Amino acid sequence: MPALLRSADGVLSVLLAPPCAACGTPLPHPSRGPVCQACWSRIPRFVPPLCSQCGDPLLSWRKNSGDDERCPRCREHSSPVTASRAIGPYDGTLREIIHAFKYGGCRSLSRGLGDLLRASAAEILASVDLAVPVPLHGRRRRARGFNQARELARHLGVPVADALRRTRATASQADLPAEARHGNVQGAFAMRRLMARVNVEGLRVVLVDDVSTTGATIEACASALRAAGAADVSAVTAARVVSRPRE
């Protein structure tokens, strides 16, 4: 099998010369996926110390007995999400890989991203009962052909349930200023109904999405799960935008 793969890589490289979906250079091993190994290795990772609630990097652990391990914003902001983790910042190579996955039709990238996220969020994933993908509106899911959040969730080693639905179509969060994003998704998520309903009462649930920018979408989903009786809601995303001061 390794010999056959090497032969296939050689033929594909010569005949098609497919480019890496992230950096654009010719793939030396096309059979291994649409992103070269060099790009996977260049992905920046979040490393401790991190805010225990939102997952943002901190300058240092807080040492005083009266302080907790949260960033200043999380200490001032009440959230239905108790803990969050991401692979790294939504920038550079990680951003390019997510774009190829989400918009370029490279659905197979979900495995590589899912494996990295599983490692980055191991502590959270070890204590949850259920992974719930952030849902897409039906029209957007049909246009894209898949829900990227669900594809990521499949590779986290946790039971997956489509517990949530979109109650209305919303403007793309990426097209809105930060201050408008919470209002855009307020009340936009609810539990699925009738035969498709998932009982989350008393469960520790982890929400899964591709990118967290302001956290508005994640918090709107978490509020719906909390209202349905979830005992705890955490969140994991492939990337996170870090735009505010770190300390």
Image (spheres, grey):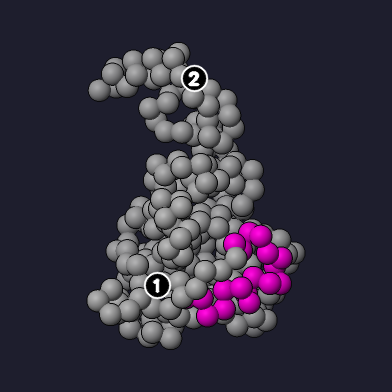
Nearest to the observer: residue 177 or residue 23: 177
26 on left or right of 182: left
Q: Position of residue 44 (x, y in %)?
A: 59, 46
161 on left or right of 75: left
In this picture, is 160 found above or below 44?
below
Residue that mark 1 sits on = 164
Mark 2 closeness class: few <14, some 14–19, many ≥20 residues within 10 Å: some
* Residue at 56% across, 36% down: 22
* Residue at 61% across, 53% down: 89
Amino acid type assigned to the residue bearing label 2 in the image: Ala
Residue 208 shows up from this direction: no
Q: Position of residue 244 (x, y in %)?
A: 73, 64
* Residue at 30% across, 76% down: 198
Q: Tag 2, which secondary structure?
A: loop
On-image quarter of the C terminus: bottom right
Amino acid type assigned to the residue bearing label 1 in the image: Leu
* Residue at 34% across, 55% down: 154
Residue that mark 2 sits on = 17
In this picture, is 12 found above or below 61?
above
Q: Which residues are magenta?
A: 172-189
Q: Position of residue 35 (x, y in %)?
A: 49, 34
Report if residue 222 lies within the magenta region. no
C-alpha gap between disc 2 and disc 1 = 42 Å
